[in-house]
Image: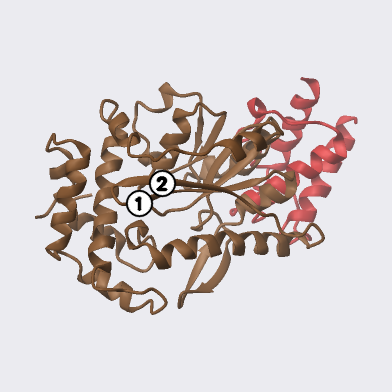
Amino acid sequence: MAGIVPAIAASGLPLGWQLHLLRAAARLGWRQSRLQRWGADHPQIAVGPDWCQRAWWGVAAGGVVQRHLANRSLRAAALRLAEPINWSELDAARRAGGVIIATAHLGPPKFLMHVLLERHLPLLVWTNAADLPPWLPATTNATFLDPLLPDERSVLMVKSAVHLRRGGVLLGAADMQTGARSQEFDRLGRRWHLSPGLPALARRLSVPTFLMLALWQGNRVRIDCHRLDPPADELADDQWQQAWLERYWNELEKCITSTAENLRFLRGIDEGRFRRELGM
Amino acid sequence: MNPADLAETVYAVIREQAATPDTTILPDTPLGPDGLGIDSVGCLEIVLELERRTGISLRDEHLTAESLATPSGLVRLLEQAGRA
């Protein structure tokens, strides 16, 4: 069953059927021992009898959907998985100026970015350039910056500030360290390193932040979007950023502890090996 | 602001952000990890403070990795933005 993700993605079956097939494959319990160990190491997460199957399905289904999103002719089928989205609060904030959209490495990879690209927002995206389909940048007016590339990282914050000041929308994730600086959190029995870039921009430019996550809900994808309340103005900059990150993290933790299929195991699991087992 | 004052302002602001403020700062001293150890968040602080002190607003088309890499790059960046 090695390479199940590319095999199913290349099957030519409708995407909905592919996701159902992966559910059946998940029930076989194949390659789930690594997930069981991860769950056992995190006692705050209720690892019930079907937890490993759901977690495995989430990673595999995310891989299949990401392959659809990367394929120009299949991308629309993937985007049709999205439940209707309520844009009203975000649109209202945009009319007043720049907006930060803080997302996270949960749920199907890159789904939210593609949803936002379809909306033709004046978007600047922090993303791993290796994950971008080669055809994509030429088809959008969005700007992409890769925090992992030293040259792009060095201008990332300043370009983002200029973009926000001009009323643009910035999409980034703060749930992993990409630069020299990080904020550490001891939660769920382990240490997490969050990136202070987004809260630094929110603080210095006084722009609102929306937490947006694309999350599995059955075989569909729900886009959660709500404003992240800013910490109190009177806090010192570092305390303000810490408070912002705590609020952000609290929202992620609800998802991490409650919906196995939205975990992507970016930390604490041999992610590379796990993904290779799935052929991703 | 004349060029000498501009350069002096750039050096003063960089010194405030540098991990070791007593370090000698030369025109080509790298601001990043190979030099003063200023990361991208620190770089943002420098630029916003320079904008505040000089009254010059930077625009996206002026911003390059090179322009934010050294004190001399920042001085050139501000001169260029000030002329625009």
- The answer as to whether the residues below labels 1 and 2 share one chain is yes
Residue A47 sits in quarter = bottom left
The residue that disc 1 covers is: A217
Any part of residue A26 in sight: yes
Instruction: Name the quarter where the N terminus of chain A is drawn.
Output: bottom left
| Contact? badges 1 and 2 (CB < 8 Å) | yes
**Please, is residue A67 above or below residue A122 in the view?**
below
| x then y, percent, for residue A231 | 72, 59
Give the residue drawn at x 43%, y 38%. Answer: A84
| x then y, percent, for residue B4 | 88, 35
Question: What secondary structure is found at the residue carrying circle 2?
Answer: strand
Give the residue drawn at x 61%, y 43%. Answer: A100
Report the chain shown in red. B
C-alpha span from label 1 to label 2: 6 Å
Question: Pointer 1 indicates a residue of which chain?
Answer: A
- Which sits in the foreground, A6 or A58? A58
Tag 2: residue type?
Answer: Arg
Q: What hue does chain A carry in this figure?
A: brown
Q: Is B63 displayed left or right of A51 in the figure?
A: right
The residue that disc 2 covers is: A222
